[in-house]
Image (cartoon, coloured by chain):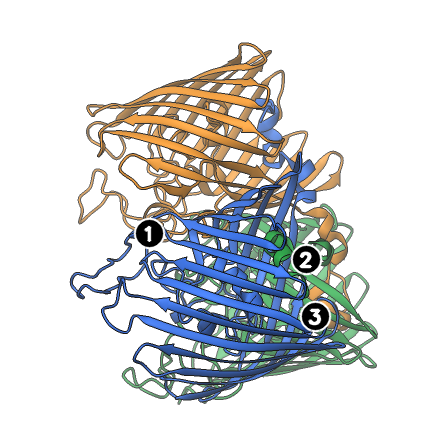
Chain colours: A blue, B orange, C green
């Protein structure tokens, strides 16, 4: 900031070079494979999210750090930015865009990212939160809930934009994570009729939140086990409650279970409550990890969804593994029973 | 270029690895904070531009260098590419995309970037050119002028695309910076009625420039002070004249002033001239820097805009600071008086 | 994957830092210059593609490697992602997005990239495949063929999305490259009337492929010469056959020739066949390389296209060169004869 004006004009574009490279780390994932779903032709697709990220930290002294993280999401089969329903392109840094400070008080960040619940809960799901239909994260773990109902059409539904994120330090195995959003609405969100009418929807296009969205998780870890309590409220005042636990029954075997309830009584007059539960296991032996899970989602007054999934991850190295998934999902959809097969490679860099 | 064909086919995708990493520097800024404006709810937003850039230089011998710079701009609160009015996404490399040569003759670059005036003038504005409403750069410093009236709708208005940029070396404190654009029009620009009619606008959708846009600044530095003379003409032949100066009254105190005139007589029959001026000060003591400014913009025959701003930047390190801004702007708008408060963090990497 | 839950919650965003930086290489090209075409005003543009890429490899042991490559394409004159016809923005990683394994068996990759033919054939064209109108790659080398007729409107037409890419090792100078696509259709592709009617087109909007697209090249290299045989079939069953050869007549002089035939009889009742040929030469002396080519394209029953091009590349270093092109193209277009002049700089990083 104290550079001379005229020197700046010539070298200005390159100011700050000296410290730049050391501060930024590039990381990411490429995950692609062959996918076959009932009633669809063989396709190239993904199992996990594909990311290309940039992050860094700076020591500020006295144990304080500044940190940032920017994470691109993309589709490896077509080279586009990650796409939502209808081929809508999501934000460039769909993964996250946050800046903050970390110290003995914990970590506080500002920007866009997974909510406390959506981030913490992946540890209690046997497929570790992958968006593949074989995983349980995007439907059963969350009981069909969306964290971002007023977001841009096609956006992912497990993040808050315009939010403050706080992670406490771990104290005696106990930790709290909190996310609080502003009431800002996203330009481009769809109307939500809710308890209104098509002509006078409860939330119009581009509405602001009617209350501050928040998400809180409390986790407690003791020995080989952990438990999570979570609550979240989104911008249209839908509420979520979740309880989950895992235990390392042996060093190779992780068992887990979760129960989640979504309450939409602010926008629905009937059938406001959805419950879901799942159980899962991971068994690791040598280079192979077996994944298994079963769960159900029960919307009030509507048909149940039932899902069973098996997976195998075969490590070629610490950063690369092959995967083989098979799963079946039954529910009030067409067709009513869908099989999903996937074989592919996941490479972290 | 001389790789064997068949070796290339196998390793082709990875050719050029050896020199790659050393040549590219990653840099950027993340700036996010809480913003409160009169008549708007509390929001997450930015004060400075948010960038993620890639740049490098290559020594060509005899003091000649090749150089490039590509700079992404983004919104940290939502993770999107930088957005203009109406949520329109700007180019990926909104910051700049340029390639060129540097030597004893100065620096010549081709591509897209800030015009000579828009880049140089930030040094004479107490908030160093940040786009925050607390800053003076985007309105009063430029007297409401736009450098890119035929750009894509929603684009920023302080850059030339399709341009050649020349920066002279500094000789005895004197330097000249010049930007010249081609007459190419951008696909997607809006019509400008100007002296025409709605049915027959002076510049139709996607029009080419009616004259080559250019921007020239001459700066002279002597001891603790500097002066700038600038002129610019955009694609619809609006002209700008600006004179500005600063002086380091003490090593801690920088005083500055600027006067700018915009002349739109090519596209307006009346009220073609807008004048603006501002005075500002920066006072640095220890880790704190105080910013203050006042200015007015006077469009011919229309109401004045008056702005007063105060800011504080508290450095946590060389690369990270907290900021606190308060400002008031009065003018022919609704509401006629707007307060703007911001508190946030700026981290460079 | 075995991080403790609660430690993860605090440092999670930064997991995996240790191996990240070493694994990723950044590379790219910036190419910009002045371009003058008959009947168009002087413009800033490009000669070669502009890229910003990220790639890496991981040793898996036993000679096996995991590898990935993500390649952004952009327009340096305007800072946007690469644009197709009508200013449509192409995918972020338009260059390629692939992940795969390499070993003694060759290299297998999944994702999106140039087809085997489109990639291999650039070695038999005097301008090495640049998209400039001075080059022969995008029209005459391929006889007007498109590899991706069902891709997004405005996409480039020389790539397969949703594909598997296999490159054999070179054995006694012989090598085979193969690309096979799935039958997935792209959301957003235009209808192809083909042998149908406007109301009932042969391929509707967003159609899937009617057969698996594939591309195969076989190359044989012996001493100073090489020959290529290629065949490709796209998603609407247009077929391509190509034969090409080059010889290094002297160490400075490369001579080349190619003949390609496109057969569209699946979608056309008449005029289904297009033939094209070209001859070219590269002559390198010191820092200068001269490029020359001539070719014709003859659609069945329609007017010929004839192109002659001359180029000069003057190296400033291994990574930077200046270029000067002049070419003329005559054909069934308006105007019927187009001259193209370009002068610019190409910088690799």
Disc 2, disc 1: CB below 8 Å? no
What residue is disc 1 on? A185
> Does A93 appear above or below B212?
below
Image quadrant holding the N terminus of chain B, namely bottom right
Gap in angstroms between the C-alphas marked 2 and 1: 34 Å
Residue in front for this viewpoint, C302 or C26: C26
Quadrant of residue C187 within the rendered picture: bottom left
On the rendered structure, is A188 left or right of A231?
A: left
Gap in angstroms between the C-alphas marked 2 and 3: 13 Å
Residue A320: mark: 3
| Label 3: few (<14), some (14–19) or many (≥20) C-alpha neighbours in 10 Å | many
The answer to whether any part of residue A330 appears in the image is: yes
Image quadrant holding the C terminus of chain B, namely top right
Give the label, 2 or 3, closer to the camera: 2
Callout 1: chain: A
Quadrant of residue C246 within the rendered picture: bottom right
Asked which secondary structure carries label 1, the reply is loop
Callout 3: chain: A
The answer to whether any part of residue C82 appears in the image is: no
Q: Position of residue B257 (x, y in %)?
A: 43, 16
Q: Position of residue C285 (x, y in %)?
A: 77, 54
């Amino acid at each position: 900031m104290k550079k001379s004006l005229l020197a700046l004009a010539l070298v200005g574009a390159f100011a700050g070079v000296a410290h730049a490279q050391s501060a930024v780390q590039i990381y990411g994932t490429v995950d692609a494979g062959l996918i076959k779903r009932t009633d669809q032709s063989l396709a190239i697709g993904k199992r996990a999210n594909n990311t290309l990220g940039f992050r860094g930290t700076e020591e500020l002294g006295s144990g304080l750090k500044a940190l940032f993280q920017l994470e691109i999401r993309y589709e490896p089969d077509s080279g586009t930015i990650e796409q939502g329903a209808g081929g809508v392109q999501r934000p460039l840094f769909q993964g996250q865009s946050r800046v903050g400070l970390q110290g003995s008080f914990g970590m506080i960040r500002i920007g866009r990212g997974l909510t406390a619940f959506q981030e913490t809960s992946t540890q209690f799901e046997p497929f570790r939160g992958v968006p593949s239909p074989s995983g349980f994260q995007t439907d059963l773990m969350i009981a069909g809930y969306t964290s971002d109902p007023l977001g841009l059409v096609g956006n992912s539904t497990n993040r808050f934009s315009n939010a403050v994120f706080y992670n406490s330090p771990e104290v005696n195995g106990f930790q709290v994570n909190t996310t609080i959003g502003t009431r800002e609405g996203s330009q481009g969100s769809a109307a939500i009729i809710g308890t209104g009418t098509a002509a006078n929807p409860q939330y119009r296009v581009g509405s602001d939140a009617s209350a501050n969205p928040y998400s809180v998780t409390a986790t407690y870890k003791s020995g080989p086990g952990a438990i999570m309590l979570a609550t979240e409220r989104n911008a249209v005042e839908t509420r979520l409650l979740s309880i989950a636990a895992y235990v390392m029954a042996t060093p190779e075997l992780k068992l887990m279970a979760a129960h989640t309830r979504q309450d939409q009584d602010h926008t629905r007059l009937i059938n406001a409550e959805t419950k879901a539960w799942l159980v899962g296991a991971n068994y690791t032996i040598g280079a192979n990890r077996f994944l298994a899970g079963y769960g159900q989602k029960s919307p009030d007054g509507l048909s149940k969804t039932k899902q069973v999934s098996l997976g195998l991850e075969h490590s070629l190295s610490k950063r690369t593994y092959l995967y083989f998934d098979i799963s079946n999902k039954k529910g009030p959809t067409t067709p009513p029973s869908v099989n999903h097969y996937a074989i592919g490679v996941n490479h972290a860099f």
